[in-house]
Amino acid sequence: MTWCRVRDAVDDRTLVAYVRIRMRPDAATAARAPALEKLADGVRAGDRRALAKAITLVESTRPSHQEQAQRLLELLLPHTGHAARVGVTGVPGVGKSTFIEAFELSLIGRGKRVAVLAVDPSSARSGGSILGDKTRMPRLAAASEAFIRPSPSAGSLGGVARRTREAMLVCEAAGYDVVLVETVGVGQSETAVASMVDFFLVLMLAGAGDELQGIKKGILELADCLAVNKADGDNVAHAERAAAEYASALRLFRHTSASWDPPVVTISGLHVIGIDRVWEIIEEHRRTLSASGELEARRREQQHAWFWNMIDEGLKRWFLGRDDVKRLLPKMEDAVASATLTPTEAARRLLAAVDAARTR
């Protein structure tokens, strides 16, 4: 299959096949096959321990674990694609965890099984994360119909973990009806979450300053719904006024869907006000985009973007693993730090060195 055909026909199976291009089964891998099949059976049966173990395997950065993870995903792929994929973002302090707990408990009351993939920011110094989302959602964490998985962002841009997409597939294979991704918070790269979900919900605050500066233009263009949170008590009037301003702002932008106009609602996660309305909007959005074919097209585009992200990641890992790059890289970094070379020229010299070695 040529690269052009791969780009035109990319899907979940193509993505997994790409990751395995350089992976050839050896005796050790063959010996692990029954264990992977048993793990896949446990995931499909809804076993929470198996689900947690599978996501841990998917998130591991060890090459041997990544090979096993891709083989596991191959076993699970036929059982994915049926869940509603929802992304939730918002500035720190907007009340994401409080909203998510109220929202997911409401869905459980409707007979749904729900999974939450919560991404915590990693320290730029130590690389560690608190991973305290379960403590912020105690009632949801105690519900047997819910699964909460906190993961570190590990320096990954976009407010999502590197393997969030794979973790979503594992949760879908486990039979969860709704898979929700809670991101780190709104930032310039936060829109990455919109590239992996069906519905992108942005939580907002009222009275936090100029409402039109509350979020980036890119977020406005990608949002499928804006929800002004903490609309309770004395803040109701402020929330309604903010919602009206956001609704006016949304009319200035071109959105991702030609058949969907993002609504703006007021909610209170703490007092469980307007929560059911959010789910009704998500269902209406799903029906509308399914009828027009946009939902299927959106998922195809997401797979295509994921595919090329994996190529970018693989090429960078291959590049940094070369011996000639390892020898030259410290010199280029020192030159950039001392301002004797521009970053562009330093990068050009590294790439030129690799190209020269390849053509020799």
Image: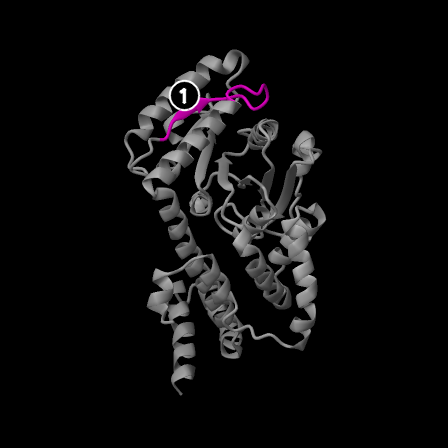
Residue at numbered disc 1: 242
Q: How is the image coloured?
A: one colour
- Which quadrant: the C terminus? bottom left
Vertical arrangement, residue 26 with respect to residue 44, above or below: below
Q: Which quadrant, please, contains the N terminus?
A: bottom left
Quarter residue 65 falls in: bottom right
> Is residue 264 on the magenta stretch?
yes
- Between residue 245 and residue 35, name the one nearer to us: 35
Image position, residue 175 (x, y; %): 59, 44
Residue at the spot 53% in from the left edge and 19% down from the top edge: 273
Q: Nearer the viewer, residue 12 or 334?
A: 12
- Disc 1 packing (10 Å; few <14; some 14–19; many ≥20): many
Q: Residue at x 37, y 28 (%)?
A: 212
Residue 162 is at least partly visible in this image: no
- Which quadrant holds residue 305? bottom left
- Look at the image and give the residue range highlighted in magenta: 262-274
**Residue in the image at 63% along x and 50% along y:** 44
Indicate the position of residue 326 as horizontal and vertical percent values.
Answer: 53, 74
Camera sees residue 147:
yes
Residue, far bottom? 360
x and y, in percent, of residue 318 in the image: 50, 71
Whether residue 142 is in magenta: the answer is no
| Amino acid at the residue labelled 1 | Ala
Q: Based on the displayed image, in which of its 4 quarters is residue 213 positioned?
A: top left
Q: Residue at x 43, y 73 (%)?
A: 350
Residue 139: % across, % down: 68, 29
Left or right: where 347 falls relative to 44: left
Q: Nearer the viewer, residue 5 or 136?
A: 5
